[in-house]
Image (spheres, helix red, strand yellow):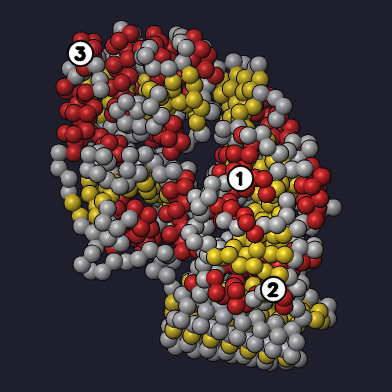
Amino acid sequence: MQAVIMAGGFGTRLKPLTNNAPKPMIHIANKPMMEHVVNLLKSHGINDLIVLLYVQPDLIKNYFKDGSDFGVKIEYVLAEEDYGTAGAVKNVEKIIKDDDFMVISADIITDINISKPIDFHIGKKSDATIVLTHVENPLSFGIVITDAEGKITKFLEKPTWSEVFSDTINTGIYILNRSVLKMIPEKSEFDFSKDLFPLLLKDGKKLFGHISNGYWKDVGTLSEYRQSHLDIIAGKINLNIDGEKLGDKNITVGAKSIVDITCDIENSILGKDVHILQNCKIKNCVIGDNCTIGENTSISGSVIGKASKIGANCDIQESILGYKTYAGNNVFIGAGAVVSDVCHIGNGAVINPNVKIWPFKNVEDGAILSESLIWSDKWSAKIFGQYGITGLANLEITPEFASKLGAAFGATVGKNRTISVSRDSHKTSRLFSRAMMSGVLSVGVNVNDFSDTPISIVRYQAKQFKSSGGIHVRKHPFDKKLLNIKFFDSNGLDFSSLGEQKIERLFFREDYTRVGSEETGEIFYPTHGTEYYTDGFLKTIDTEKIIKRKFKIVIDYSYGSSSKIFPAVIGKLGIDSVHLNANLDQTKITKTEREFKKSLKELSSIVRSINADLGIFIDNGGEKIYLCDENGDNIDGNTALTLMAMLVMKTEKKFQSISVPVNSSFNISKMAKEHDYEIIYAKNSSSCLMEKAGNSKIYFAGDNEGGYIYPGFMPAFDGMYSTIKLLEMLAKLDSSIKNEMRFIEPTYFEYKKVPCPTELKGFIMRKFFEKYSDENVLLIDGIKLIKPQGWVLAYPASEGAHFEIFSESKDKDAAGVLINEFSRDIESWKAERDISALS
């Protein structure tokens, strides 16, 4: 059998190690990653290899030549363009000789017995077989579900935690029948996971998955690179490591290496011609060929590249040093630091933790090198959460961090384009919005500065001002120490998860270019933006109905920027209104939970005392609203969403679709059947609701936390518009909130957090799917089990080591039974994994 080795990876997440070499040539245990792959193929009798090249091809060709030195035959093909994974294989169709062949990545580390999936593929007469494995964190991979025979029934590429339904993932190793190549277009971008496999599944082809045991790691990040070495040292993978095992301290030493007898070395791999001088301590390390370590130096948990020289009295902790790096005497290198190839670190220099140094750089004697941002663990791998970016102001989110983040966002948008920036009225938000702007301007992107303006207004104006996206900075509504940063696209919608990942990649690899002094961006201060918003607002409202009804309402602005705009809109609609907390007060825009409840209580009291029709609390960001009826009774978020959805169905007959989260009340689906409406379920996140709302047939979308969207005006949350739409619908029905609540059947919601280590989340989701897949389940956001007495939903939290469980039933006890059933499942499966680990 032939094998096609995909060796065209850029390795951008491994920068700066990949600045001078393509990813397949980065060394693992003193050999290029691709050499380990070639050795694996050869050990299973596969020695006819086609290597697909793209990035720095000569480095690979010069090392492997024709393959004869490695016991294989290699034919190289250089890609003309980046046609994607499947498109690249299509490009070599003419030189694939066999009916069945293997495709494997050159930048993985594995000891999987690949003969087993090959035999499985042939036995099943499969069109395509994906080699699968289980991993603790499946977010970076394609996850897969197979039936009892191994036939693939479902897969999803690079999910979020709420989308995870298994810990079984695609390893990037495939056995294919050459007939499937006919389904790949020539010279077009076409991917195996995103394009070919879904097409095979859709066309009913024989698409199988083989779950393989053994070690497998996609060495995609610097932390995974270092961890793969620790796994090799620990014996978790069977690799061909050059050298001789010595003593009982798990040491492998290459030929002609010399270690002084006074040294303390354990759990380490030393390459050839390594010299370690007196009194050194080396633990959990891989030292490359031709390295020299000076006396009294301590190195732990680190990878030292070939031909590097480390001086005396150094302390190197959990770091990576590239090829031919020199570190003088008394050097300290902190955990997580990466020093790339041919760098010179002077005597007494200090390299702070997590600092990255690009190739060919010199650090002077005695210098203390740190990032302009002092990294914290919070930002070590991921910065976006469920609500954008949230962190401790001036501690986790610093001005340096914000400037760098602005540069990454600007690079995502592109030079010479324009973005919008807005904020709330707090001085800290002003500080960080300006820091963000400095980063944006530094990469040649212009800024429309809207100052303290509600985000809904800035979203609406994105198209009017030809904005390519935007940033909104605000204090957290319920924690004074936290700052929240939101990003939106050119349509005013929250950035998609793919967009967030792109910003994160640029941020972490620092791969953006500062422009020259004459090319920096400009700041503009738009005028008439509020008038444009107000005009568009009123054009989509039945103003006559509202004016005729003569509403009397109470509004609490919670000291937010909406108070600058909304009173004028209300005045044009003949609404008798009482305005609470309508001045800007930066000291009061954040409320504790107790203060929030107190505000709602005060709102209710005033509604009752003046006999108002209803009360509205608008959050300080102007996006969400909280309701009380004419009796002053507060309406919880679940019931408020049901109320809004019901009013839409009653008043808008020409539309047939609304979108709500999968954890919304079953009353909504019941009402939808009565009114001939379609429910389109979404994940419980603002970005997903906005994405659904972008569908032209959807009239309304909303969540359980006071956020409502009317896409006919804008496919994003807007508390001011939601308030007026509520009044419009009540006016059309000549009704009140209290009266409409009679049509909503009472139900009971339960909510529970169940602790679960992050590394078990994928395993738990797989167990859920295996147990309940034959029942009535939805897999839109976690797993939702629907039963006659109600429903229960569980999904792994996107932030935090726990599962979130929701349930609803007409009976309070039944809701508790449902939530406890899922809770017991999780605890049982956690215990099962613990027992398995001990055995």
Mark 1 against mark 3, which lies toward the viewer?
A: 1
Which badge, 1 or 3, comes first in the chain's sequence? 1
Q: Is residue 622 left or right of residue 294?
A: left
Q: Quadrant of residue 369?
A: bottom left
Q: Secondary structure at mark 1?
A: helix
507 lies above or below 803: below
Q: Amino acid at mark 2?
A: Gly
Q: Percent from the top left, x then y, of residue 557? A: 28, 32
Mark 3 against mark 2, which lies toward the viewer?
A: 2
**Could one spot residue 715 in this view of the protein?**
yes
Q: Which residue is mark 3?
A: 544
Q: Which residue is mark 1?
A: 182
Q: Quadrant of residue 780?
A: top right
**Residues at marks 1 and 3, CA–CA distance in whole angstroms:** 62 Å
Q: Is residue 478 left or right of residue 74?
A: left
**Residues at marks 1 and 2, CA–CA distance in whole angstroms:** 29 Å
Q: Which residue shows up at 62% across the image and 43% down it?
A: 197
519 lies above or below 645: below
Q: Quick one: label 1, few (<14), some, or many (20+) residues within 10 Å? A: few
Q: Secondary structure at mark 2?
A: loop
Q: Percent from the top left, x then y, of residue 104? A: 66, 58
The answer to which of 140 and 336 lies nearer the viewer is 140
Q: Secondary structure at mark 3?
A: helix
Q: Which residue shows up at 49% across the image and 82% down it?
A: 343
Q: Percent from the top left, x then y, of residue 196? A: 59, 44
Q: Which residue shows up at 57% across the image and 80% down it?
A: 323
The answer to which of 660 and 342 lies nearer the viewer is 342
Q: Amino acid at mark 3?
A: Glu
674 lies above or below 460: above
Which badge, 3 or 2, comes first in the chain's sequence? 2
Q: Which residue is mark 2?
A: 67
